[in-house]
Amino acid sequence: MLEKQQLQEILDVCVSTGGDFAEIFEEKKTTHSYGLLNGQVEQANSGIVYGIGMRIYHGTESVYAYSNDTSMDNLRKMAKDLSASYDEEKKVSCKELIEVVYENQHPILMDPTNVSSEEKIKVAKLATQGASEYDPVIQKVMVRYLDEKQEVAISNTEGKYVQDTRIRTRLAIQVIAIDGDKMETGFYGPGASKGFEFYSEMNPYEAGKEAARIAKTLVYADECPSGNMPVIIDNGFGGVIFHEACGHSLEASSVAKNQSVFSGKLGEKIASSKVSAVDDGTITNAWGSSNVDDEGNFTKRNLLIENGILKGYMIDTLNGRRMGMPSTSNSRRQSYKYETTSRMTNTFILNGEDTLEEMIADTPYGLYCKSMSGGSVDPSTGDFNFAVQEGYLIQDGKITKPVKGASLIGNGAETLLKIDKVGNNLKRAQGMCGSSSGSIPTDVGQPAIRVSQMIVGGRE
Amino acid sequence: MNISKLMEKAKALQIDPIEVYIQKSEKQSIEVFAQKVDALTIAQSGGMAIRGIYNGKMGYCFVEEDSDDNIDTCLQMLMENAKSLELDEPSFIYAGDNEYPSVEVTENQLVNVDASEKIAYLKEVESKLAQSDPRIVQVMGSLMETQQVQTQIYNSLGMDLHKQESYTVFYSSVLAQENNDNKSAYEIKVMHSFDECPIDEYVEKLKEKVCSKLNATQVKTGKYKVILKNNAMSSLLGAFTGLFDGEQVYKGISKLKDKMNEMIFDEKITILDDPLKKDGINSTPFDDEGVTSYTKTVVENGVLKLFLHNQKSAAQMNTTSTGNGFKSGYASSVGIHPTNFYIQPSDVSFDALVEQMDCGLIIDEINGLHAGLNPITTDFSLQAAGYYVENGKIVKPVNLITVAGNFLEMMKEVEVVGSDLEDALSSASAPSILFTSLSISGE
């Protein structure tokens, strides 16, 4: 990694032509992945990502450069080329860089870079075993073990120098169940901002079983009916509804330029009064947590919605300038190859007072979604979609049969107002979220909720 | 990194043969918003992936820091990874071919154009879009990105291949509003010079695209005749190219595994994979293993003729590589990808297709492809938008519906294939196609 003095020199070049602020993001990331098919390792890859990204602010404009060549000669040239975007008198100089010292909020017990590949593969084999022993219909089990150690050093012209190490690991289990002509898949992918200790805290065998259970259920499921109906979405990955229907539209990257349906709506009622939601990057060792965001600001717990009233957005410093609001420490990026911007961390709906049992009993006809796949949204219109992995039909207040192949669609602003029940079984789940600054780990989450009317797209 | 030093050290460690894949790129991206350069990115980046055979297994690793200090670390990672492998699979490093075809490419003049000219172009697009219609309330962004990518493959069997690719993409996105209804749209162009994309034409097209969708309503849930417009059809086809992937076939995951030479689609469907197509987005003289590219028919009049292979999958199935061994990024292992994979067009125009449908839906937007479809079972249910057609005429825009079906079943019930195949921005492309019946969910 570069020395403070070297960074200071480069930062100073960055602001030599009238930029009012500059920042350097230096990153080294070591990754390991193993892919197993039916318990045998078929893929192993590892490597080191390393490079630097530099950014200059000029009011609300920004310019960005990145390279994997971090020799001082190249960095000087890059800073010079980048600063050529402006041609004014120098306004600021880089202050002396002083390291921000803090206590690590996400302690790691076993750094995965010190764990042998045999140990990691053993975990993946245990998950495979859990899946394949579940039922004879489980015929293919694909398990991917991943870990990464990302070391970042963030410095800026205001004299900030902060380092953070983010260690994450995940087990992605995909299972195929086959019975005659019928073939279905099940996925389960637990992860955390933890070291290898994660696998002694969770049970890989049970995780494998869970993926298998989903696949087997779907093999014997009927096609999901289509139409407009009440939908109950259970906890955990069900939270993807809030992530798509609301989360993305509360990111400053869309809000700042008036490109979100929720721009200018602070203090207004945007959701049912049963809904309160937060984005919390501070949760100890959670998948979307870190000590500091990718601008080096300490992560926070930010209230987004309280009893249906919009209370806050997720803001990075550049969009904060556009909005006249401070950063909420939500600036994130996949790597140095992306200019950082406002993104979610761990975003979820808080517990309410209803129960899942009551919700089901209170629904004459509808869909119960036990687990979801991903989705997407257009923040400017709020139109979103997400897919149901494991669904069940509700008839006369009772779950009657599993159904497959459904997508749920709607408009975020309308759907949030139609949440008429919020349960008390909050749980978070792990996902990868893709947007302008790349693919980043985020937690989604919620207790079970009911939406009074939603469009269910099935094949029947 | 000093390649010969790496190869020497590898040999001493009994990693033999060894291959180095290097990718270097230069990028410039400019975004204009509110008549200002809102964001500008310049980058030179690259990475190196190394693979080699150690104890009969193929070990992989990758690195971005271009320093000789990393040679030992890399070789250690490679050996460690090779040792982890358990599946008894053939491993190959290819010595290379004697000759490689040439691909016809239009010179990208925008590589040498000064940033100020690009900014001026983007500003003009932005202001013309903003003035084109009072319902366009914002031009959300106008971006132009030029990238030059250099790829090199060296191996200890003597391969020494280079290629250089360059592209410029441009897009603008707009937000329109009427009666409290919001609609956004964008239009992407691959261009080699400004002349290729006249601003007035572009503005007119994007304006029409967004404004014609305002005040859209839903249609009633039911089965409809559907025209999947070329862009939507291309996205859908692209999501299912794994069906033809040789690795998925020998692993028994592809539903087409036992269907060689059988009728899998309607006889109106012929699919080609053409890596030598002029200006094709994925055109290349060789794949990422250095195997020669050639044009091939994958489906002929509905009959399955070929699976796509890299060297490993070809060996598993006792055949030869089709030159489709590609990485999904420099760091990844070599998988299988189509190049320019397309459904052959007919001579039926889009208008004739609409007339022939008489009553039904045109779907020109589908969303949620990463979640709402199952690439293995080929079932899909996707958020969609488009137009409702009555008596062969478009009568209203439609939004917030889902279209659902099963790709393999749907492709057996093709009514008419259109003629409007366009150059795609991804590997798969298709003309608009009229289908007999798909499930629509709405009101």
Image (spheres, coloured by chain):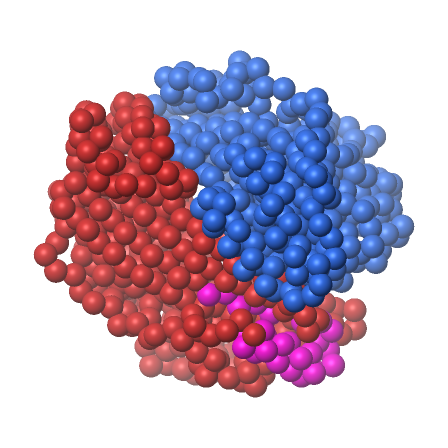
Q: Residue at x 69, y 46 (%)?
A: A94
The residue range painted magenta reads B117-146
Horizontal arrangement in the rendering, residue B405 relative to residue A54 (left or right): left
A305 falls in the magenta region:
no
Instruction: Kindly give the residue lying farthest to the left in the view shown.
Output: B98
Q: How many marks?
A: 0
* Chain with colour red in the figure: B
Q: Nearer the viewer, residue A379 or B245?
A: A379
Q: Report whether residue A382 is seen.
A: no
B127 falls in the magenta region:
yes
Horizontal arrangement in the rendering, residue A16 relative to residue A271 (left or right): left
Residue B145 rendering spot, x and y as whole percentages: 50, 65
Q: Report whether residue A267 is seen.
A: yes
Residue B40 rendering spot, x and y as whole percentages: 59, 62
Horizontal arrangement in the rendering, residue B352 relative to residue B93 (left or right): right
Note whether B183 is above or below A145 in the view shown.
below
Q: Residue at x 74, y 73 (%)?
A: B137
Residue B3 rendering spot, x and y as whole percentages: 25, 41
Horizontal arrangement in the rendering, residue B243 relative to residue A148 (left or right): left
* Chain with colour blue in the figure: A
Residue A377 rendering spot, x and y as whole percentages: 63, 54
Displayed quadrant of residue A401:
top right
Note whether B122 is above or below B29 in the view shown.
below
Q: Nearer the viewer, residue B125 or A396?
A: B125
